[in-house]
Image (cartoon, rainbow, N blue to C red):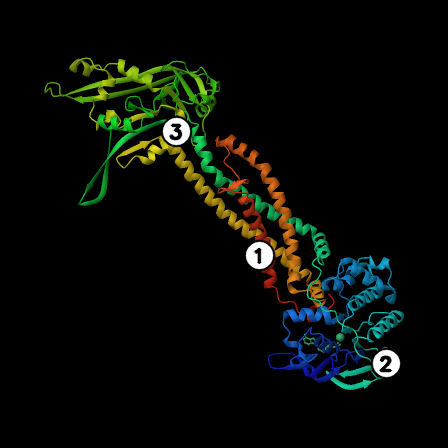
C-alpha cells in the first residue's frame, strides 16, 4: 500500500469575485514508503503548492490527500501536531531557523519536542555532524551568524534528527554552491534508504543523478511521471511516536525573547508596577482611613464636649411637612439621662450669653475667626493633657488663662508675627436680654450682660488640624462659677437678688436664653467611644451634637468619596495597564510569527507557542510583583508621615499585608492572583484576536 496518495487534487485561488485560477489541476499520485522522489518544473508550475498539500501546510480545493489511508484534511489539532512531530519534516526554501538561538539548539528542538532530555538531544546532534560537515564551533554559533550553506545544512540536520517517515524539501539546493549542493543531495539520498524523501527542484541534472523517480510538472499538471531506477526496500524505520515533549524545551526561547525585547519589557514592567503599587496604596487608604480618622479625631482637646437638646416633632394631618421644634430638655429628662449615661457631666448651656464667637482683640486690632470653646475643667481627667505641646495647662480653673490649639497658634503667629504664647487676648461681647413682667407699670425689663476680659495664652495643644478651626479653650466650671456670682442688674431689683446662672436655670425650656440645649462633658477623656455609642442609641427625641463627631463624620464621607474616586481611577488605570501589556505582547506575537510557525511545523502545540508569550508576561508579572511589594513596603511609612504632616491624620494608608478580613496573607494573595490574571488576559486576548497562523503563508515567504 502506498504511504501517501493524492486523488484528483486541485488547488485554486480566487482572482476576483467570479474567476478562479487553478494552480494545481486534477493531480493523482501515490508515493511509496521509501525512496527519493523529485518534483521538477519551471518556476510557477505548482511544485511548492503540491509539496504544501502533501505536508498539510495547506488544504486542497478539491480532491483528497491520504496518509496511510487517512484523509489528512480531516485531522484534528492533536493529530496534526502528532503528524508534524512524529511523521513529517520540512526543509524550507528559506531555512527558517530560530535566528536568535544557537545552531545546536535549533537541531535539538525536534528531539526536545519529542520529549528527549537536553543531554540525549545533544548526543543525537553530535552523532550527525560528520555527515553534514558541521563542527562544534558552528554548532555553538547563533544562527544569524551562519553562512547560507551552513544554515541550509543546519536546517536539513533539524529535519533529519528524528529520522522522520517523510521528509519534504523545497529547493534545498537553490541557494548553495555546487559542493554544498552535492553534499545535501548525498544526505537526502542516504535518508531515502529508510524514509520517503520528496524534493522540489528545478535542477534537472541533480534530480537525474540522485532520484529514484522524477515527477515533471507544468502549469499545475503532472505531465510525466518518470521512473529513473527501481525503488526497492521497505521502510524499516520504526517511528518512535511520542505524545508529550520535554517540558523545558522553551526555556531558552523565553530567555532569549526576554532579552531581545528588553527595553519593551522594561516598559511593561514599569506599567505593571505602577498599577500594582497604586492598587495597593489605594486599597491601603480605603482600608486604613476610617480607623485613622477615628484615632485622629479622638486627639481633640474638646472631643468630649457636646450639646444635647430635645426635638419636638409636630406633624399635621393637613400638611406633609413635619415641623421640628428644638427645646432644652426638662430637668426630669436630664435626670433620666444622667442615670442612664452616667459618664457625662450635664451642665446648663451659657452659649447665649457667652457665645463661641466673641469679639477678639490683640491690643486694638480685631482678630477674626477664633472660637471660644469650653472644656469641662483644666484640672481633671475630662481632658487629654498629653496633647499639650507648648507652655502649660493652668493648674486651677480660671477664665483669665486660656489654652489654644495648634491651628490657632499658627494663625496668631502669622497675624501677629510673634510667638503667641503669653500673648494677651481681649475677649468682648454684649448682650441685652428683655424680660416680661406681670407689672402693668413695668411690663418689661432689659438686662445687659457684658463679657469683657483680658486672657493670657498659657498653653498650646496639638490636635487634628485637618478641617479644624482655631480655638481658645477655657474651663466651663470657671464660667459656671463666674455666672453664679454675677448678678442681674435690673431684674434682680425687681425680683430680689438673682444670678445669671439662676436666671438661666429657671428659664422656660423654650426661651432663647437657654440656648435650647444643655452642655455635656465626658468625665473621662478616654471614654470617647461611649459618646459615639450614646449618639447611636439616643432615640429620635434627643439630638446630641458634637463638633468632633461632626468633623469625624465629614471626614468619613470625604475619604469614602475619595476612595470611590480613586478606585474608579484605579480600574481605569488597570484597564490601561492591561491594554499596554496586551499591545506589547500583541506586537511581540506578530513580530515572532515566523518563529511560531517554525515551532508549529516542528510539532509544537499551538498552546505551547501561546505559552511562550504567557511565560514571558508571567515573568514580567512576577518581577513587577516582587518590586512592587518592596516599593510599597518602603513607601507606606514615608507616605503616612507626609499625610500626617499636612493633616495630622495618623497612618491613613494601612496596607493589610499580614492579615485581611481575619485571613493571614489574603491581601498579598489577592494582589498576586490579580496581577497574574491581568498578565494572562493581556497575553491571550491579542493572540486570540490575531489571525490564526497560516503556516503555508508564513513559511513560504522570506521576510
Ligand atoms: P513553484 O513552487 O512551482 O514555483 P508555486 O506552487 O509556488 O510554484 O505557485 C504556483 C502558482 O500559484 C504561481 O503562479 C503562484 O503565483 C500561484 N500562487 C501561489 N500562492 C498563491 C496565492 N496565495 N494566491 C494566488 N496565487 C498563488
Ligand atoms: Mg516554489
Residue 273 seen by the camera: yes
SS of the residue under disc 3: helix
Some atom of ligand 1 lies within 8 Å of the CB belonging to the residue at label 1: no
Q: In this view, does 159 lie above or below 486?
A: below
Instruction: Check disc 3 and report the residue beneath it.
Output: 528
Quadrant of the frame with the C terminus: bottom right
Q: For this rendering, which residue is in front, 651 or 317?
A: 651
Above or below, 413 against 205 in this view is above
Mark 3 or mark 2: name the one nearer the start of the chain. Answer: 2
**Residue at the spot 68% in from the left edge and 82% down from the top edge:** 10
What residue is rendered at 40% in x and 34% in y?
552
Neighbor class of circle 1 (other Cα within 10 Å; few <14, some 14-19, many 20+) is some
**What residue occupies the far bottom of the structure in this picture?**
224
Any mark on residue 681, and which? 1
* Residue under the image location 44 percent in, 41 percent down: 560
Disc 1 element = helix
Quadrant in the rendering for residue 510? top left
Residue 493 placement (x, y as % from top left):
17, 13
- Can you give x and y, in whole percent of width and height, for residue 546 in the image? 35, 30
Q: Which of marks 1 and 3 is in front?
A: 3
Query: Does mark 2 have its CB less than 8 Å from ligand 1?
Result: no
Asked whether the beta carbons under mark 3 and mark 2 sit within 8 Å of each other, the answer is: no
Please report whichever mark, 2 or 1, sits nearer to the chain's N-terminal start.
2
Q: How far apart are marks 2 and 1 (CA)?
A: 55 Å
Q: Mark 2 points at which residue?
A: 208
> Would you say residue 699 is visible in this rendering?
no
Amino acid at each position: 500500500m502506498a504511504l501517501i496518495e493524492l486523488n484528483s487534487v486541485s488547488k485554486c485561488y480566487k482572482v476576483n469575485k467570479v474567476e478562479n485560477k487553478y494552480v494545481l489541476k486534477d493531480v493523482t499520485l501515490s508515493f511509496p514508503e521509501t525512496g527519493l522522489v523529485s518534483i521538477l518544473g519551471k518556476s510557477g508550475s505548482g511544485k511548492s503548492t503540491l509539496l504544501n498539500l502533501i505536508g498539510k501546510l495547506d488544504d486542497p480545493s478539491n480532491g483528497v490527500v491520504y496518509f496511510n489511508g487517512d484523509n489528512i484534511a480531516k485531522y484534528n489539532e492533536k493529530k496534526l501536531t502528532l503528524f508534524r512531530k512524529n511523521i513529517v519534516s520540512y526543509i524550507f526554501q528559506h531555512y527558517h531557523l530560530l535566528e536568535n538561538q544557537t545552531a545546536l539548539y535549533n537541531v535539538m528542538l525536534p528531539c526536545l519536542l519529542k520529549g528527549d532530555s537536553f543531554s540525549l538531544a545533544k548526543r543525537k546532534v553530535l552523532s550527525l555532524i560528520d555527515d553534514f560537515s558541521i563542527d562544534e564551533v558552528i554548532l555553538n554559533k547563533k544562527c544569524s551568524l551562519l553562512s547560507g550553506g551552513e544554515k541550509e545544512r543546519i536546517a536539513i540536520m533539524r529535519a533529519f534528527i528524528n529520522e522522520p517517515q517523510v521528509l519534504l524539501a523545497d529547493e534545498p539546493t537553490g541557494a548553495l554552491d555546487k559542493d554544498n549542493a552535492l553534499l545535501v543531495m548525498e544526505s537526502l539520498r542516504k535518508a531515502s534508504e529508510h524514509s520517503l524523501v520528496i524534493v522540489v527542484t528545478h535542477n534537472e541534472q541533480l534530480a537525474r543523478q540522485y532520484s529514484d523517480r522524477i515527477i515533471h510538472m507544468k502549469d499545475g499538471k503532472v505531465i510525466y511521471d518518470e521512473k529513473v531506477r527501481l525503488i526497492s526496500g521497505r521502510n524499516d524505520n520504526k517511528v518512535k511516536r511520542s505524545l508529550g515533549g520535554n517540558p523545558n524545551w522553551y526555556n531558552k526561547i523565553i530567555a532569549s525573547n526576554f532579552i531581545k525585547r528588553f527595553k519593551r519589557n522594561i516598559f511593561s514592567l514599569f506599567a505593571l508596577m505602577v498599577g500594582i503599587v497604586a492598587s495597593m496604596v489605594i486599597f491601603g487608604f480605603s482600608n486604613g482611613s476610617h480607623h485613622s480618622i477615628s484615632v485622629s479625631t479622638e486627639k481633640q482637646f474638646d472631643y468630649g464636649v457636646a450639646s444635647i437638646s430635645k426635638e419636638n416633632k409636630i406633624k399635621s394631618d393637613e400638611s406633609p411637612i413635619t415641623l421640628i421644634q428644638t427645646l432644652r430638655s426638662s430637668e426630669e429628662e436630664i435626670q433620666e439621662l444622667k442615670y442612664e449615661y452616667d459618664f457625662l457631666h450635664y451642665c446648663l448651656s451659657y452659649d447665649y450669653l457667652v457665645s463661641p464667637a466673641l469679639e477678639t482683640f490683640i491690643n486694638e486690632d480685631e482678630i477674626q475667626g477664633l472660637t471660644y470653646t469650653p472644656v469641662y475643667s483644666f484640672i481633671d481627667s475630662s481632658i487629654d493633657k498629653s496633647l499639650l505641646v507648648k507652655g502649660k495647662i493652668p493648674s486651677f480653673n480660671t477664665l483669665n488663662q486660656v489654652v489654644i490649639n495648634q491651628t490657632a497658634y499658627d494663625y496668631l503667629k502669622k497675624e501677629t508675627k510673634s510667638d503667641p504664647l503669653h500673648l494677651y487676648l481681649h475677649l468682648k461681647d454684649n448682650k441685652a436680654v428683655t424680660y416680661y413682667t406681670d407689672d402693668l407699670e413695668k411690663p418689661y425689663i432689659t438686662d445687659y450682660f457684658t463679657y469683657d476680659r483680658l486672657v493670657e495664652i498659657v498653653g498650646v495643644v496639638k490636635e487634628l488640624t485637618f478641617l479644624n478651626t482655631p480655638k481658645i479653650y477655657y474651663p466651663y466650671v470657671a464660667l459656671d462659677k463666674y455666672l453664679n456670682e454675677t448678678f442681674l442688674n435690673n431684674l434682680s431689683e425687681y425680683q430680689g437678688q438673682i444670678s445669671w446662672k439662676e436666671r438661666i436655670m429657671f428659664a422656660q425650656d423654650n426661651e432663647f436664653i437657654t440656648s435650647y440645649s444643655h452642655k455635656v462633658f465626658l468625665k473621662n477623656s478616654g471614654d470617647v467611644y461611649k459618646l459615639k455609642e450614646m449618639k447611636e442609641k439616643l432615640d429620635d427625641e434627643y439630638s446630641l451634637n458634637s463638633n468632633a463627631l461632626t468633623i469625624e463624620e465629614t471626614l468619613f464621607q470625604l475619604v469614602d468619596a475619595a476612595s470611590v474616586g480613586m478606585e474608579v481611577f484605579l480600574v481605569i488605570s488597570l484597564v490601561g495597564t492591561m491594554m499596554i501589556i496586551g499591545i506589547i505582547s500583541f506586537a511581540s506575537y506578530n513580530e515572532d510569527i515566523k518563529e511560531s510557525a517554525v515551532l508549529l511545523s516542528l510539532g509544537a502545540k499551538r498552546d505551547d507557542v501561546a505559552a511562550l508569550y504567557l511565560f514571558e508576561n508571567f515573568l514580567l508579572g512576577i518581577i513587577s510583583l516582587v518590586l512592587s511589594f518592596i516599593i510599597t513596603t518602603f513607601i507606606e511609612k514615608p507616605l503616612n508621615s507626609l499625610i500626617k504632616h499636612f493633616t495630622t491624620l495618623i497612618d491613613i494608608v494601612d496596607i493589610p499585608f499580614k492579615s485581611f478580613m481575619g485571613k493571614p496573607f489574603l491581601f498579598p494573595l489577592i494582589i498576586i492572583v490579580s496581577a497574574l490574571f491581568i498578565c494572562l488576559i493581556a497575553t491571550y486576548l491579542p493572540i486570540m484576536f490575531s489571525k490564526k497562523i497560516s503556516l503555508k503563508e508564513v513559511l513560504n515567504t522570506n521576510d
